[in-house]
Image: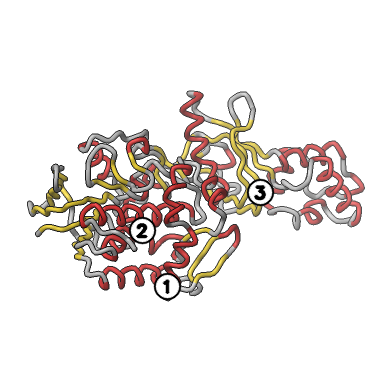
Amino acid sequence: MKYDVVVIGGGPSGLMAAITAGRHGANTSLIEKGKKLGRKLAISGGGRCNVTNVLPDKELIEHIPGNGKFLYSAFSIFNNYSIIDYFESLGVKLKEEDKGRMFPVNDKAITVVNRLLEQIDQHDINTKLNTKVDAIHYGEDHHTIILDDGEKIETSSVVIAVGGKSVPHTGSEGQGYAWAKKAGHTITDLYPTEVPMTSNEPFIKQKILQGISLRDVTITALKPNGKPIKTHRWDLLFTHEGVSGPAALRLSQYVVKALKKHKVDQLKVSIDCFPDINEQQLVEQLMSASKQSPNKSVKQVWKPMIQERVLLYLMELAQLDPSTTYHHLEKKKVISLAHNMKNFELNVNGTLPIEKAFITGGGVSLKEIVPSEMASKIMDRLYFCGEVLDIHGYTGGFNITAAFSTGYIAGLNAAQRATNYIEE
């Protein structure tokens, strides 16, 4: 059978591309190698599905450090507010949480997935699950998709929406890069982003702080000469392998790039546990708190200010006995502690592998893509969307916004190219 549009990949961008193509009159097929559509959506946002972010376009793009400016054209057609309107039109009520993140009111990602699946049915989109694509043969007026069982599917337009190489259990194993290369496209270097960082520091290996979270701190990656590369402010989590949590995840791509650029085995990162005050103010706060309870140990007095295990570790570095009271407190050691709290340094030697990352950095070169169409500049009737492109953002609804937006643009233009449909 011949289709107007075939979408390969049933993730966020692929679902949006297929639905959009179907809505715009294209006879559409959606091929997914797994047994379910929307697997990545179903686990996103901790199972709650952070569908988008309400920041203005300029700020939204700033939160997509991997070529976010490329999305200006796409966002002028289908942006974060378009996504909100779309899902609310399907009966998915959304709520705004901290930092502009938008979630379903019922906190259930499956609601989002189910509404999209209903749209797949409503627009008579042929779905092929548990179906692997072996190859794509490109032609002048149509393309032929070869399935692994030998079946051939002809289509006017192809949309490649198979994701990157991260979270492979959802089906993203990097197969789209080979199909892009066959069409003549360049694949930029692939690397993990939004991924926990690793460290060989003794306190990490000894699990002294494992499982401890620090709220609203800053973490800065430092060049070998000590100059800052990038700082992020949010929550941080110490693990048995290094550091994770949103602030560390956002910083990870800069560490990956810096390790490669400077050809070093490790870099320092510095954590500021009290980013709203300077060291002198922190010294004064510590001294004042101890003075107000002069007979209590400093550990008891100061532990409401910071996680106790972190406090004890930093006090040990400052050679400050936790049982000390104000009567015997040496200010120089308080100054040392405050410095440690403001400059908690550790060496990181890399990140977990790309398969453990939330997002893949790199992908199909954007120099070869028409930004207002998601169309290949090299191969007619070929479109790309989602993470297979060299686009990546921070966690917080930014990657999924890029996926839905590029999916919509790809599906719309693939349909128009195949059917000559003109939107009213």
> Quadrant of the rendered structure where residue 294 is?
bottom right
Q: Residues within 10 Å of mark 3 (few under 14, many from 20)?
A: some
> Quadrant of the rendered structure where residue 30 is?
bottom left
Secondary-structure class at tag 2: helix
Asked if disc 1 and disc 2 are in contact, CB closer than 8 Å, the reply is no
Query: Residue 108 location, x and y as percent?
Result: 44, 71
Asked if disc 3 and disc 1 are in contact, CB closer than 8 Å, the reply is no
Separation of residues labelled 3 and 1 (CA atoms): 38 Å
- Depth check: give the residue in front, 291 or 393: 393
Query: Residue 135 location, x and y as percent?
Result: 15, 45
The residue that mark 2 highlights is 12
Residue visible at 34% across and 60% down in the picture: 16
Query: Residue 211 location, x and y as percent?
Result: 56, 54
Q: Going by the image, does 63 lie left or right of 220?
A: left
Residue visible at 37% across and 33% down in the picture: 189
Q: Amino acid at mark 1?
A: Ser
Secondary-structure class at tag 3: strand
Residue visible at 27% across and 35% down in the picture: 185
Q: Amino acid at mark 2?
A: Pro
Residue 217: mark: 3
Query: Residue 88 location, x and y as percent?
Result: 45, 72
Quadrant for the N terminus in the image? bottom left
Q: Amino acid at mark 3?
A: Val
Q: Residues within 10 Å of mark 1 (few under 14, many from 20)?
A: few
The residue that mark 1 highlights is 89
Q: Which is in the foreground here, disc 2 or disc 3?
A: 2
Residue visible at 17% across and 52% down in the picture: 156
Secondary-structure class at tag 1: helix
Separation of residues labelled 1 and 2 (CA atoms): 17 Å
Quadrant for the C terminus in the image? bottom left
